[in-house]
Image: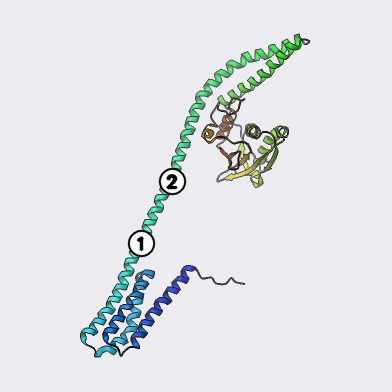
């Protein structure tokens, strides 16, 4: 069954206006034709009333409305002029002049209204263009600011990378000697509990320092990614598996929903992406503390596919958000501040994007995007 015909509000208003104009003209004409007994001056006075529908028609419908209403009035009024041929020639000419003026006023008013509407449309278009330009300049300014931040970050990364590489090599050699010495001393004096405790502390702290040195080297000399094509869900599954024990230890509920995004193919270094996933989840766990929920969801943007990790922690102050990817910057009591710098470098090497913002409901939202690859039969998805 077909839907009932609906009249648009603009069409309904036009129809009502046309009816009003037509009725006004008919009523005035009727009064003229039913009042022959009055003097010609009375009819001339009534004739002025025709300006009202003509001007209104011109204002509503432009020149065509003014001209059409003027012609209708002229046609309806012609028999009336023929009836008054007995009046003076001056009065008869006056009525003809009035009819001509009605038509001229109708056209002129419509013309001026059309010009005014065109000027208004141009003005509104200019305002819209100006608004678009302002928005474009604003976007370009924001993009330029982001690029400047990236350039400054790259400069700091380059300088600190050279320093870290040299420093890490100089630290690693004596550090290895200290750890080996502590192991040998433990073996030589297995009964000495004091020496054993000291050696245990030396080994633990040496191991922690060695991990920091490894982070320095990863940051200073990032490996060229060995890319392979695979489904995004495989990257996520392997990366999250490494963090499951930490999630359980902190009694944090982990909710994951990739949806159809998980089947999208990306070209990545598998080991590096596992490192990215682990670092992001560890940061979320440390920010979350005990209990709560960490969510991982699929996300897609034009040409990119990825994921979003959200926690329910305290978030990061807005004034330090721009620096979270800078090397050696950290808000934690422990840590070298290189985790997110390494993650940023890996994602950038893969041609992707990473952003970190505060959630409105609390916590941090980390968004990771990677370029989508065309899926073919050789893609590995498991």
Question: Where 9 sits versus 179, above or below?
Answer: below
Residue in the picture at 58% in, 23% down: 216
Residue in the picture at 36% in, 59% down: 120
Residue holding disc 1: 118
Q: Is residue 377 left or right of residue 344?
A: right
Residue in the picture at 61% in, 17% down: 172
What is the x, y in percent for residue 207?
A: 67, 20
Q: Quadrant of residue 45?
A: bottom left
The extreme top residue here reads 188
The residue carrying pointer 2 sits among few (fewer than 14), some (14 to 19) or many (20 or more) residues within 10 Å by Cα, namely few
* Residue 186 appears in the picture as rendered: no
What is the x, y in percent for residue 349?
A: 56, 33
Secondary structure beneath disc 1? helix
* Residue 76 appears in the picture as rendered: yes
Which residue is at the front of the view, 179 or 201?
201
What is the x, y in percent for residue 152?
A: 47, 30
Residue in the picture at 34% in, 66% down: 113
Q: Quadrant of residue 228?
A: top right
Q: Is residue 42 left or right of residue 356?
A: left
Looking at the figure, which quarter contains the C terminus? top right
Residue holding disc 2: 136
Q: Quadrant of residue 187?
A: top right
Q: Residues under labels 1 and 2: Cα distance?
A: 26 Å
């Amino acid at each position: 069954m077909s839907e009932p015909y609906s009249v648009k509000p603009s069409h309904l208003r036009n129809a009502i206006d046309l009816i009003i104009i037509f009725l006004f003209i008919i009523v005035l004409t009727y009064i003229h034709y039913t009042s022959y007994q009055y003097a010609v001056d009375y009819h001339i006075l009534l004739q002025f009333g025709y300006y009202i529908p003509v001007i209104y028609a011109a204002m509503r419908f432009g020149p065509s409305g003014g001209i059409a209403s003027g012609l209708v009035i002229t046609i309806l009024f012609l028999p009336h002029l023929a009836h008054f041929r007995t009046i003076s020639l001056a009065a008869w000419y006056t009525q003809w002049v009035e009819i001509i003026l009605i038509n001229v006023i109708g056209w002129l008013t419509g013309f001026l209204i059309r010009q005014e509407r065109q000027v208004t449309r141009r003005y509104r278009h200019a305002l819209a263009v100006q608004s678009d330009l302002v928005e474009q300049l604003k976007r370009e300014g924001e993009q330029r600011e982001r690029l400047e931040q990236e350039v400054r970050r790259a400069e700091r990364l380059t300088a600190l990378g050279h320093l870290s590489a040299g420093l890490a090599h100089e630290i690693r050699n004596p550090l290895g000697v200290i750890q080996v010495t502590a192991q040998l001393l433990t073996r030589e004096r297995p009964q000495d509990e004091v020496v054993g405790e000291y050696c245990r502390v030396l080994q633990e702290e040496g191991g922690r320092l060695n991990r920091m040195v490894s982070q320095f080297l990863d940051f200073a000399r990032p490996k060229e990614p060995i890319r392979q094509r695979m489904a995004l869900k495989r990257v996520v599954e392997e990366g999250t598996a490494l963090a499951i024990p930490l999630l359980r230890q902190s009694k944090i509920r982990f909710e994951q929903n990739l949806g159809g995004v998980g089947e999208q193919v990306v070209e990545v270094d598998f080991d590096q992406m596992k490192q990215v996933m682990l670092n992001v989840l560890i940061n979320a766990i440390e920010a979350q503390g005990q209990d709560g929920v960490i969510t991982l969801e699929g996300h897609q943007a034009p040409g990119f596919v990825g994921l979003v990790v959200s926690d329910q922690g305290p978030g990061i102050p807005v004034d330090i958000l721009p620096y979270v990817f800078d090397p050696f910057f950290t808000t934690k009591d422990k840590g070298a501040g290189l985790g997110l710098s390494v993650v940023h470098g890996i994602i950038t090497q893969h041609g992707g994007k990473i952003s970190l913002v505060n959630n409105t409901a609390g916590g941090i939202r980390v968004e990771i995007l990677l370029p989508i690859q065309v899926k073919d039969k050789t893609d590995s998805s498991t």
